[in-house]
Structures are given as structure tokens and as C-alpha cells.
Amino acid sequence: IACNKAGSVTEIFLHNHYFGDGTGLGNLNLSSFPNLVSLNIDRCGVEGSIPEQIGLLSNLNYLSLKENRLTGKLPVSLTNLILLEELFLAANKFSGELPVSLNNLTHLTYISLDGNNFSGNLPDSFTNLIHLEYFDLSTNKFSGELPVSLTHLTHLKVLTLDGNNFSGNLPDSFTNLIHLEYLDLSRNNLSGELPVSLTNLTHLTTLALSRNNFSGKLPVWLTKLAHLSYLGLSYNNFSGKLPASLANLTNLKSLYLKRNKLTGPIPPSYGSIVNLTFLDLSTNHLNGSIPKEIANLQNLQTLDLGDNNLDGPIPSNFSNLGLLNYLNLGMNSINGPIPLDIANLKKLERLDLNHNSLVGQIHGNLSKLAYLDVSSNRLSGLTYSDFPDLEFLDLSLNHKLTAIAPDPSSDHYRGIGLSCNASGGKSTCNEHMPRKNLVHNLTIFLPIGGGLCFLLLVYVCYKKHKATEKTIQPETKKHGNVCSIWNYDGTIAYEDFIIATEDFDLKYCIGTGGYGSVYEAKLPDGKTFALKKLHHFEAEQPTFNQSFKNEVQMLTNLRHKNIVKLYGFCLHNKCNFLVYEYMEKGSLFCALSDSELAVEVDWIKRVNIIKDVAHALAYMHHDCIPPIVHRDISSNNILLNSELEGFVADFGAARLLDLDSSNQTSIAGTLGYIAPELAYNIVVTEKCDVYSFGVVVLETIGGKHPGDLLSSLNYPTSQGTTLECILDKRLPYPTNRNSTPENQEQLLTTNDSILLRLIESNLLLHDVPRLLKKFPGLSRNFITATENFDPKYCSGTGGYGSVCEAKLPDGKTFALKKLHSFEAKQPTFVQNKNIVKLYGFCLHNKCNFLVYEYMEKGSLFCTLSNNELAIEVDSIKRVNIIKDVAHALAYMHQDCSPPIIHRDISTNNILLNSELEGFVADFGAAKLLNPNSSDQTIIVRTLGYIAPELPYNMIVTTIVTCTALGRWHLRQLEGSILGPVSIPKPFD
């Protein structure tokens, strides 16, 4: 706070000082500061509307209230601030139309109203703002045509209107804005051709017009904008050839022309734009070869020419592009070999050459790559040992690959998305038939095959002719076999869904996303489903069929109570849709946006929703093999059932992770939830979901997207951000014992703790089971390795069998559980990093045994009984072992459906690996818990670990296992089995 010599307050600067809940500008008593010249209350959590008292500050020339929670319309009294020069109200929730009276503030030079909810047409009355230099109205809801009065602001240097709903053509009178340096009109609905009047904007350095509906040819007059450094025209309808004259824009650093309808060759003259750093011409209809002159662009960091009709070889002089980081030439018709000189590109990390006609060898000297996609070519040869930094590798559909594929069990290649015809281990990517035999076989089978094809064609024509005489609807007959709705007849289900939604009438639409619209369908039997109808442009993509099948396959393999169930799918010439479980309460975003429903979702329910999502993500990241990354976790993709339980939905972005697809390069997700590091490296890991989950956690606690909070993280203050700043004010402050402020504070650390867990955990891969399938006479190998289960190889004995150590000739070691009587009860779908892996079993006339992952340190009981080993298992390791077992039991009890009860948790059945991590083993007594039965059973478990209530009620529940868990917790701490313990009666 600053004062003049008379002691009157002239400046108030309260940037980043949080006022507290419910504080509004009215609390400041603005009438007490008649001489105030500057008022800055940025990021202070101020709520409510701007009071009419603001008009009393007649001497004010600087007003900044940005990044608060202010709402409502701008007060009329604001126009009394006739000396105001700078007005910053960005990142609030102001609404309504802009008041016409703003035109009276003739001294204004800066106006920043971006990131609000202003709507309506812009008033055509800005003629008096003759001193205005900076005008930002981006990310609002303005509509209508751009008013002509904008072009009267002749001193404008920056005009930003992106992210609105403006329509119509650009006014010709833009020619008056001769001082304009920055023009951003992207993400609107503007159309028509670019007016020639823009040529007068000779000071323009940035012209951003992407994501509109502009059409026509790229104007040649763009070359008159000599100072232009950024030209963004992507996602429009421009057509015609690329003008060679664009090469005259020698100051151009970024040229984005992606996803238009441009044709013809790439002009060689573009090689003279020496300052060019980013060049994106992808997804057009360009043809011809890649001009070798492009290699003159020595400052180029990103070159994207993918998804065109380019042909010819890759220019050999691309080695001159020393700063190139990303090269995409995929989805073209490029031929010839991959130039050896590309290895000289030391900065190159991502190379995408998929879906071309490349031949020759894949050179191992591409040693610094992190991403390599050469799928769908005709390449041969490979040297994996020279790829130390690879994070993604796609070699699929290269039928001449003959080199050795890497051993997936090697840590060196863990996480690589290898998509060749290799099942793992040292196998080849292709099995070759001798050429002589191939020619001989073709000579025999081609004539036979031709004859069969002719007969088949005659038969099809006959059936088609007969079908025209029938009155059955062709859709049903033709497409019934591609409509798969489980537990329903495919044809009937398709017709029922079309009738239930009245052919997908909009009145049944309950949501729209990036990959499709969701409809509510209530069938005649009363069951309700959610239908996700995919957008038509998705179905037109070349990789759609495979991607669609992969998405369906992935979702059918996901079995978790907090993931929305997929019931089926339908591929039809008119529409493609997926059939999902119906969620009555809609999305979490809608629930938080609805005032009444937001109150119904109280603190307990919100915490439970967060836990539900966390469990689903933990399952996808840790228990699925390989891990699944959702890539679009947001409040829109968290659905709620009638009980307000949370479910993860919309795996449309996860489908983009398909290793046989070039979509791996796409940034997927919802703005505001995407991990910031994706902006510069586009490398997808589980941490992407973790960041998004953290945003959802804060949104759930605060009742709105935490954009302000996330922005404030870039501006650290001494005060920091307390939980009170972000709690949803529509709910009473949590005061009960189950949801204390301390507990709520812990929610803020959830993101960090899960991130740490992801960093420290090992990814589980199905490499060893695949290797086992390759062993011929596997049972003989095991019997030989144990000398027919000689007792000297026995490492432990339990109630259901003896465990022997088997070391195979290749050095791999397994644990064999030889059963007293065959008992393979461990469910094959149990997958958790803290449960011992079951690799297989053997039924033999002499013996029956199970093949398990080998645990080097044996059982916890043996470890605690050994004085030396017990000292090695210090208190930290014991706590971690307890946590490992707790995680495994939580998965069995909470995430498996139906739940699994182990029934024999004891120190003998907790095994330790070489790192002294705990694993639950011995499922011989395990039982699937049927929620609709009494689950009465006989007593099976280890004495000393049995729940005390079992002897008299014989009912198995998860509490039985929890009792055993608690007892061996104490066993861990004390190092010996407990004697009689007084157990209090069960309480509710």
C-alpha cells in the first residue's frame, strides 16, 4: 500500500494475498480511497461481483482483478473511471454482454477480459478507444460477426479473440489496423477467403487463424507480411497448391498448414526460409517427392509431412538438419531405403516412417532415438543392441524382417512397444519359406485358388439376386453378424437400439466427447444402456477397423468394479457404436456443475469417488499386463451410478496407444488435464494419468476445475496455498471425525504419493509365461531339474503340497508346488504385483504340480525364524512387507468381482523375493465370495491365524482374512507367533 505526501492511499497491491472464504470487493470499502490511482487484487480468491462503488475511484488509471472468482456482469459504474488506462479482469467468471459504455473509457490502452463467460455480440461502438494497444477477449462465448468498429482501433498492436464462436468473414476494413503486430482469431467459426486488406498489416509478426472454416487458395499476398514469424492456418479448408512465394517470408519461424486440402508438390523454394524452426504440412493431399532443398533449413526442429501422397526416396542430405528433433514422414508412398546419414541427426528423438514403401535394412546406428515407428513397410534386418534409449518401437507388418528380436525380460528393453511377429525371447519377426518351395507352391495353388474365387463370385451374385426378391430389411441381414451384444441376439439388439434411440435422435443424447456422442437407450425389457456412437470422421480413418477392434478387445479384458462395463459393439455402414453400462448420475463434471447435485455429493462421497478412480487407475497401471494408460482422465470421463460411486469411462484415447497404429504420436486428452510435459516430449507413461488424476482430485474437492490453483503453482509465494482456498464453498466445512481438516489435507498429497508409487514400482510383463510355452517336453525338464522331486530340492511343505526349486538348463529358476491332490484353485485372472505369479501347471500320471514365480528368500516364517535373516529384515522392510500384503488383499477383496478370500494368510504363505518384497502365495484354501450366499464353509487355514468367530458361525468374509493379516502384523513386529489373545466382540 502506497500513499502520497498528504497521507492519502494512492496504490493498493495485494497480489497473491488470499482474503478468505466469501470475501468480496465490498469488504474493502472502496469509498475510503478517493485518490486511489492503482488497484491490484490478483489471485486473492475474491468472490462475488464488482460493486457499484468501483465508480467512486475517479482517479484510477490501473485496475487488475484477474484470476479470482468474480462473477456477474460488469457494473455500469465502471464507465465512471474516465482516467483508466489499463483494465485486467482475465480468468474470472464474469458473464453477460460487454457494456456499450466501455466506449467512454477513452484513455484505455490495455483491455484483458480473457478466460471468462462473456457472451453475445461484441458492441459495434469501440470508436472512441483510439489509444487502445492491447485487446484480449479470448476463451469466452462471444458470437456473431466481428464488428467493423474493431477496425477503428488504429493503435492496436495485439488483438486476441481466439476460443470464441465468432462467425462470418473477416472485415475488409482490417486494413486500418496498420500498427497490428499480433492477430489471433483461431478456434472460431470464421469462414470465407482471407481478405486482401490484410496486406496493409505490414508490422504483423503473428497471424494465427487455425481451427476455423476459411477456404480458398492460400493467398500469394501473404508474402507482403515481411515481418511474419508465425503463420498458423491449420484445420481449415484451404485448397490449391502451396504458393512458392511463401519462401519470401525470410523471418518465418513457424509454418503450420496441417489438415487442409492442399495439393501439388512441396515447393523447393521453401528451403530458403532459413529461420524456419517448425514446419507442419501434414494431413493434406500433397504429392511428388520431398525436395532436397528442405535440408537447407538448418534451424528446423520439427518436420511433419505425414499423411499426404508424397513419393520418392527420403533425401540423403537430411543429415544437414542438425537440430531436427521430430521427423514424421508416415502415411505416404515414400520408397527406397532409410538413408544412413539420418544417424548423424544427433538431436533426433522421434522418427515416424510408418505406412510407406521403404525397403532395405533398419540401421542399428539410429542410436539416440526414443521413438521409432517403421510399421507397414518392406524393411529387413535389425540390430536391437544399438537402441539404448528406445521407449517405443513399432516394426509390425514388415514381412522381410529376419533379425533377432530382443529378450522382453531384459530390463534394457522394458517398456518398449514392440509390434513385430515375435512372441518374446529370441524369436524371429518372421518365419521364412525357401524361395524355391514358395514358387513351387504358388504354381500349384494359384490356378486352384483362381477357380475357387470364380465359383465363389458366381455364388455371391446368385445370393445377392435372390436377396432382392425378399422383403427383409437389408440392414438386418447384412449387418447382423457384426453386431455383438453379449447375452443378446445380435440382429435383434441392433434393431432394438435403433428403435430405442429413434435412430440416434438428439433428444436421447446425454453427452458428447472427442470420439463420439453418448445416447441413452432403454430396451423393451426395461434394461437401460449407454450407446457411444462414434463420429463419422473416426470411421473414415485408415486404421479405424483395427483400432476399433483393439479398443473392444482391451475393454473386454478389463475386469474392475470401478471401470464402466462394455457390453458389446456394432459395426454398421450407417453408424458404429459401443454398448456400455448405463450410469444414472452422469459425469462427475455435470454433478459438480449442478448446484443441487453438488450438495448431494458430500465430502464422504467425494472422497469415495476419488478412491474409486484411484483403485481403477492402480489396476490399469499395476495389475494389467502390459499396463494400460487412459490418457484422458477428466471429470467428464468419471461417471457416477445411482449410488454416486465413481467409474472410469471413455477409453477412446487409450485406443490411440495401440502399438499397431501411428496415433501414438498424437496428443490425446482434455485441455486442463493434460500433463504439461506432453507439450514438449509427447512420451506417454502412466504418469500422464497420475497428473490428470491429481487435477480431478482438486476439482472434486473444490467443485470446479483448479485452473487458478494450477496457474498459481508457477508463481510461488511465501504464504502458499492452503486447503481452505480450494474447498467447495457449497458444502459445509468438514468437521466430523471421519472427514477432518487433517484428513482433507492428506488428499492434497494423494497425487504426489501415487506418483512416487508409480516411479518406484516395477512394471509387470507377461514375458516368462510366453517363454514357458516354447519349451518342448516342459514337464520332463522340470522332473529332470528336480531329479523326480527329490527331497533335497524341497524348499518348503504346506497343507496342500511341497515346494521344490527347479533350475532349468537356460539358468531360469522356478518354484514347483507338487500337490498332494491336484488343487489349482488360484484364479488365472488374478493379477497383482504382490501376488506370486502362476505360470502354468502339469497334470501327469505320476504327479501334479503348479509352476510359480521363484521367490529367492523363501517364506516370511523362515526369515523371522532365522536370527541372521531376521536382522536383515529391519523395521523399514517389515513395514513395506506389511504394505505389500495389504495391497494384495485390498486387490482381492475390493477390486476382484466377486471378491476372493484367501482363507489362509500366515507367515508361511507370505513369500519374499531377493529385494525382500512381500508376495501372497498358496491359494489352495482360497474361495470366491458369493455376495448372494451365506458362504458357509469348513475351517481351512493355519492354527493361530484363524478368525475367532469362524468356529461358531462358519461364515467366510473379508474380515476373516483381515484378522489373519492383523495377527501376522504382530508376528512381524515381535518375531514369534502370538499366544492366546483376548479378542473383543465384533462391533459394527
Image: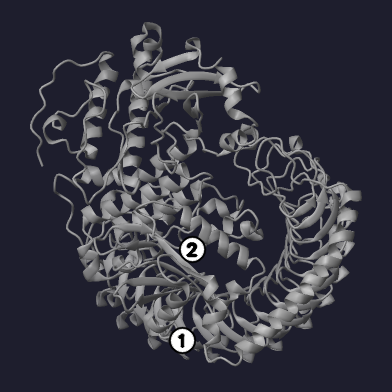
Residue 822 pos. (x, y %): 41, 30
State the residue at coordinates (23%, 24%): 945
Q: Judge whether 480 appears above or below 101 on screen.
A: above
Q: Are there few (<14), some (14-19), or many (20+) residues within 10 Å of tag 1?
A: many
Q: Is residue 29 left or right of residue 808?
A: left
Q: Which residue occupies the foreground of this view, 156 or 380? A: 380
Picture quadrant where residue 384 is located? top right
User: Quick one: label 1 or label 2, which is nearer the N terminus?
Assistant: 1
- Of badges 1 and 2, nearer the viewer stands 2
Residue 923 pos. (x, y %): 36, 32
Q: Do the CB atoms of the residues marked 1 and 2 lie less than 8 Å apart?
A: no
Q: Which residue occupies the foreground of this view, 501 or 461? A: 461
SS class, disc 1? loop
Number of callouts: 2
Q: Which residue is mark 2?
A: 671
Q: Which residue occupies the foreground of this view, 423 or 381? A: 423
Q: Are there few (<14), some (14-19), or many (20+) residues within 10 Å of tag 2?
A: few
Q: Which residue is mark 1?
A: 122
Q: Judge whether 209 appears above or below 810 on screen.
A: below
